[in-house]
Amino acid sequence: MFEYFEPESAQEAISLLGRYGEEAKILAGGTELLVNVRQKAASPKYLVNIKKTKEQLSLLGEKDEGFRLGPLCLLHDIEQEPYIKRNYSAIHEAAHQIGSFQIRNMATLGGNICQDRKCVYYNQSHVDLFMRQSLMDCWARGGKVCHAAGKDSLFHSLVGVEKCWASCSSDMLTALSCFDATIEIRGKNGVRTVQASSFWTGPDAGNKDLGSDELVTGVKLPHLPEETRSVYLKYKKDPKDFAIVSVAARMRMEKNGICEEMALYLGGIAPVPYRAVSVEEALKGKQIGTEAIVDAVKDFLEETKTRGPAMEFKVARTRSLLKNAMLRLLELRG
Ligand SMILES: Cc1cc2nc3c(=O)[nH]c(=O)nc-3n(C[C@H](O)[C@H](O)[C@H](O)COP(=O)(O)OP(=O)(O)OC[C@H]3O[C@@H](n4cnc5c(N)ncnc54)[C@H](O)[C@@H]3O)c2cc1C
């Protein structure tokens, strides 16, 4: 059982978080938190529903030399926003591919980027709760073991793992990272901003750069040169599922075919959005065509220690998704 609050303002919500700390949880659309509560992966004593702060926290529009998105913006509204579709198409495409229409109509941006990691041994709803309870508690549940470690699996990280093999499950964070978006966070000590790409910190650093007394109050996207093109591709087992691997790609090319800017972020393969630095570096400042792209991705993740066919397939799928994303960017350039 929990005590339930409906603050009328962001400030009131922050005071409640300050008062109850780790025992309190923000409730936005509830499409993730309530599943976690059912899966016994979260057991808040205090629920702070922020829906009544909608006027303050659901702005979707231009502000302060950037495009601002409030944490209470619904994924459906982000998907439908013409300005996003035109200028940040990877964000439109990421939102469009999350869950189902019903989920996107309830789910918020803040809830998406603040969601918990996903793992079959921790909170994936299709796994038998009884099976999970019969296992020793894993790192994510406060224990000292990772049941996914050493296993050949499609659904866990390939790289950047220390103790917990769960991967970054947030499609919106992967897409926002590729635009150098910033996240505004408010707490009792004031306001601060963090880069979207470093908001998830991995299991050793508490998973997110977000204190228990802090609230995400906005996301800002920088304005980009007109020639920028972006795409979001996602490979998943089921249409309503989380990404096995996803790619957010942004590129700006000169008329002569030289790649001026390139940002590539991957979801589903690491505990945080993973930047494909080696591929970016192989292509930046060069004339780009199919051959250059194929060449740039062919050895990507070569160092990964795969443990069987599932992981080998995941590496191959990651390379082909990266390649397809960049080929689509070339097509979009016209
Ligand atoms: C069937 C199904 C399919 C799904 N598919 C996908 C998918 O493909 N991709 C994907 O990324 N997600 C997916 N999800 C997960 C989830 O629905 C989304 O991540 C959704 O955007 C969460 O938003 P919400 O408003 O419902 O969050 P909630 O459930 O209300 O909250 C989620 C977490 O965020 C915290 N939180 C919410 N808002 C704030 C804030 N402003 N500041 C600080 N903390 C906050 C909450 O305390 C909680 O810990 C799926 C879920 C389901 C049930």
Image (spheres, rainbow, N blue to C red):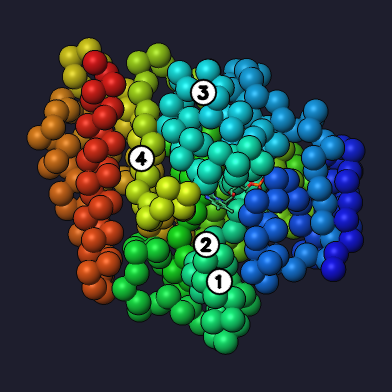
Q: Quadrant of residue 106?
A: top right
Query: Residue 267 location in percent, x, y?
Result: 41, 50
Q: Which mark is residue 122?
A: 1
Q: Closest to the observer: 188 or 120?
A: 120
Q: Secondary structure at mark 3?
A: helix
Under mark 4, the amino acid is Leu
Under mark 2, the amino acid is Lys
What residue does disc 4 label? 233
Judge whether 217 appears above or below 301 on screen: above
Q: Which numbered disc flags the more N-terminal residue, 3 or 4?
A: 3
Q: Which mark is residue 84?
A: 3
Under mark 3, the amino acid is Ile
Judge whether 71 appears above or below 245 on screen: above
What residue does disc 2 label? 118
Q: Is residue 312 visible?
A: yes
Pointer 1 with pointer 2, Cβ within 8 A: yes
Query: Residue 80 location in percent, x, y?
Result: 55, 25
Q: Residue at x 35, y 35 (%)?
A: 249
